[in-house]
Amino acid sequence: MNELMSAAPELLLKGSDKELSGGTIASVVITGIVVVFIGLILLILFVTIYGKIFDSINKRKEAKAKAEAEAKLKEAAKAAAKPLAPVVHSSVAPPEVEDGIEEEIVAVIAAAIAAMGASSGKKLALRSIKTAKGSRSAWAAAGAAENTRPF
């Protein structure tokens, strides 16, 4: 066993006893290049096929989303085509409006609240409209936000 271990480094350093001819070296190089290019061609084909599969999947999703959007548009058109229910005036008192607020602003706020109530199915009422009194100016609020922003 010791003889084999002591002879192993000498065998590694000595190398092969065969002399390689130019034809053998050329055939090994050409075979290596051909194998590499065949592998690259197969890889290109694989990626191309993979891409076409995912393109077809994405096109199906887009077609499905487009069909759903068209169905929603048709439903919305049908809902818009229905005659509106007559306006029923309730005994709700008009909102208290602070001086200096224009009637158009009140009408817009009331319409927005009515639209929110209609979308949720609840009946909302507007009781009063007042201007907001901020404790800080806009510049002071911006400075406080800047100085207290987390890193």
Image: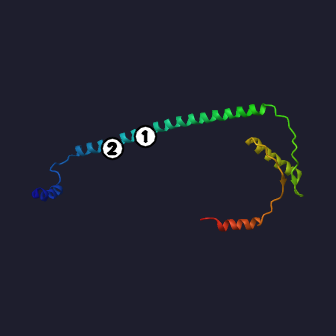
Residue under the image location 59 percent in, 36 percent down? 62
For the C terminus, give its image quadrant.
Answer: bottom right
Residue under the image location 77 percent in, 34 percent down? 80
Along the horizontal axis of the image, is 39 left or right of 13?
right
Residue 55 in picture, x, y percent from top left: 53, 37
Between 117 and 63, the one lying in front of the other is 117
Name the kind of residue labelled 2 in the image: Ile
State the image quarter where residue 61 is shown: top right
Residue under the image location 77 percent in, 66 percent down? 135
Q: In terms of sequence position, does the residue under pointer 2 or pointer 1 come before the other?
A: 2
Name the kind of residue labelled 1 in the image: Ile
The Cα atoms of the two marked residues, 2 and 1, are separated by 17 Å
Q: What is the secondary structure assignment of the residue under circle 1?
A: helix
Residue under the image location 81 percent in, 31 percent down? 83
Along the horizontal axis of the image, is 27 left or right of 66?
left
Q: Residue furthest front?
A: 91
Along the horizontal axis of the image, is 151 left or right of 8?
right
Between 73 and 38, the one lying in front of the other is 73
Label 1 packing within 10 angstroms: few (<14), some (14-19), many (20+): few
State the image quarter where residue 78 is shown: top right
Q: Is residue 108 above or below residue 66?
A: below
Residue 128 in picture, x, y percent from top left: 84, 53
Q: Is residue 22 above or below residue 150?
A: above
State the image quarter where residue 10 is shown: bottom left
* Residue 53: mark: none
Residue 124 in picture, x, y percent from top left: 79, 46
According to the picture, the residue beneath numbered tag 2 turns out to be 33
Between 142 and 128, the one lying in front of the other is 128
According to the picture, the residue beneath numbered tag 1 turns out to be 44
Q: What is the secondary structure assignment of the residue under circle 2?
A: helix
